[in-house]
């Protein structure tokens, strides 16, 4: 797969990777919310992360354009 274009997709991937570090899976919706809240409180997203994602959009769109719009290698 190629680069995700929407910055929110990259941020969700960052969150999902940190959620995956929990040793036990969530069994209820409440546990999911608790683990998400815990993850967001403990793993602080670097302040430069979000502006970087927006600033790198031109490179990601160029990458996609050179492949005819396909995000597959």
Image (cartoon, rainbow, N blue to C red):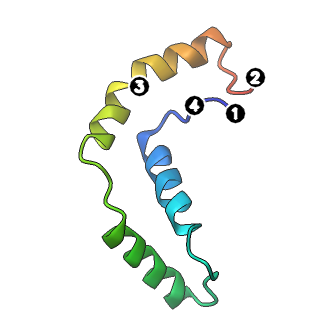
Task: Give the percent coordinates (x, y) of residue 23.
Answer: 61, 78
Tell me: 68 left or right of 51. Answer: right
Provide the secondary structure element on which disc 1 rests. loop
Measured Cα–Cα span from mark 3 to mark 1: 16 Å
Measured Cα–Cα span from mark 3 to mark 2: 19 Å
Provide the secondary structure element on which disc 3 rests. helix
Image quadrant in which you'd find residue 66:
top right
Tell me: 3 left or right of 53. Answer: right
Q: Nearer the viewer, residue 35 or 71?
A: 35
Contact between labelled residues 4 and 1, with CB atoms less than 8 Å apart: no
Which residue is under mark 2?
A: 73
Pick whichever of labels 4 and 3 is earlier in the sequence: 4
Which residue is under mark 4?
A: 3
Task: Give the percent coordinates (x, y) of residue 69.
Answer: 65, 19
Provide the secondary structure element on which disc 2 rests. loop
Contact between labelled residues 2 and 1, with CB atoms less than 8 Å apart: yes
Pick whichever of labels 3 and 2 is earlier in the sequence: 3
Tell me: 57 left or right of 60. Answer: left
Which residue is under mark 3?
A: 57
Which of the labelled discs sits on residue 1, or is there none? 1
Question: Which residue is pictured at 31% across the width and 42% down the height?
Answer: 50
Which of the labelled discs sits on residue 35, or is there none? none
Question: Which residue is pictured at 75% across the width and 22% down the height?
Answer: 73
């Amino acid at each position: 797969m190629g680069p995700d274009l929407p910055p929110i997709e990259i941020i969700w991937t960052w969150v999902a990777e940190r959620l995956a570090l929990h040793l036990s899976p969530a069994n209820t919706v409440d546990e999911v919310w608790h683990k998400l809240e815990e993850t967001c409180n403990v793993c602080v997203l670097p302040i430069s992360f979000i502006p970087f994602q927006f600033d790198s959009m031109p490179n990601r769109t160029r990458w996609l354009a050179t492949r005819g719009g396909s995000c597959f290698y």
